[in-house]
Image: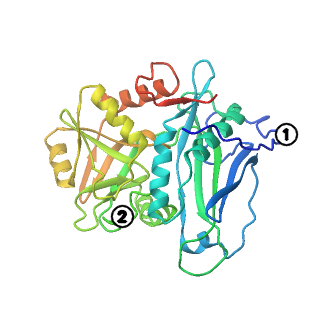
Amino acid sequence: MTAALDIPIVPIAQSKLKGLSLENLPFGKHFTDHMLEADYIDGKWTSISIRPYASLSLAPSVAALHYGQAIFEGVKAYKDQHSKPFIFRPHDNFMRFNASAERMQMPTVPVELFMDGMLQLVKLDQDWIPAYPDHSLYIRPFMFSTDEMIGVRPSDTYKFMIILSPTGPYYSAPMRIWVEEKYVRAVSGGVGYAKAAGNYGGAMYATAQAKLKGYDQVLWTDPYEHKYVQECGTMNVFFIIGNKAITPGLEEGTILGGVTRMSIMTLLEDMGLTVEERNLGMDEVLAAYQDGQLREVFGTGTAATVSLIKELCYKDHALQFDINKWEVAPSLKNKLAAIREGRIADTHGWMIPVI
């Protein structure tokens, strides 16, 4: 990494934290005192600063509002048992952020702006990191086009920002999932692997339809046969079949390469399970369930961490699970939390100290 970036800081006059309990805060509803902001103009990043969290003034013709050049990331900060702050695998998010930027024809963000900016911002607002189990400080880096124009072309100017939000558990209860066979999230050659804003907007209708049926989220399937598993709502998905953990591969570019997904794959191997990244059809899932070989199903993601799935609805089949008998997913959730909270050794070097 290059030398640390010297970022001007304008501190807030009085913190909003006074009188606010950080326990069980809903996801994404509260924001810390400060934010990072930078502008891309004339081919370089400029006007980099950390200042009090505030509204932005934007023209109604700003390109991002019309043509969707907008990407983001999700990262988390934690405090260990000694109240020292750490960020979980931020460099992996940096790499994915720039992969998204390239796919959306946006400028990449220098590592020192992304990493140093994040570390300095979290250090400044570290008192906002909740010191409770399953709680964290959610870090949201994002970038959007800022040309004031109407016309389909890449913008010449962009804004990069980081905001912070303390949060409790994202999905606190085990979920019921609807296997989607009509609507599509992504196709090969598209932007499914990018963390682009439009991917999430495009998923909302199908998710709303599933919720009307009494389900919490959708399990996306491939766009051609609606047969092969992709992602589960805002999460990657894992199936424990026999002594194997199976998750869809990344080769087709239709699913997000999750940082938590990578971490869970490593922990599964540490537990002695065989991990397979491959196409997995719902017919195979159903057959494994009927044969008693489908032991567990769970989702993973930065926001969700590890979320248990207690039911899958596929065609006329309701695949229901007694999660009280599960061993793998609860163990993974507990071990990942213990690493993040400093209760066991971080043997993989995932936790980056905020110093």
- The quarter of the picture where residue 315 lies is bottom left
- The quarter of the picture where residue 77 lies is top right
Residue placed most toward the observer, 314 or 28: 28
Residue placed most toward the observer, 257 or 113: 113
Residue 320 position within the rendered picture, expressed as x and y whole percent measured from the top left: 28, 44
Residue furthest out toward the bottom = 151
Residue placed under numbered mark 2 in the picture? 186
Residue furthest out toward the right = 13
Q: Is residue 94 left or right of residue 45?
A: left
Q: Quick one: label 2, few (<14), some, or many (20+) residues within 10 Å?
A: many
Position of residue 200 relative to residue 303, above or below, is below
Q: Residue at left 56%, top 49%?
A: 110
Instruction: Report the number of discs.
Output: 2
Q: Quick one: label 1, few (<14), some, or many (20+) residues within 10 Å?
A: few
Residue 105 position within the rendered picture, expressed as x and y whole percent measured from the top left: 49, 66
Residue placed under numbered mark 1 in the picture? 14
Q: Secondary structure at mark 1?
A: loop
Tell me the kind of residue under disc 2: Ala
Mark nearer the N terminus (1 vs 2):
1
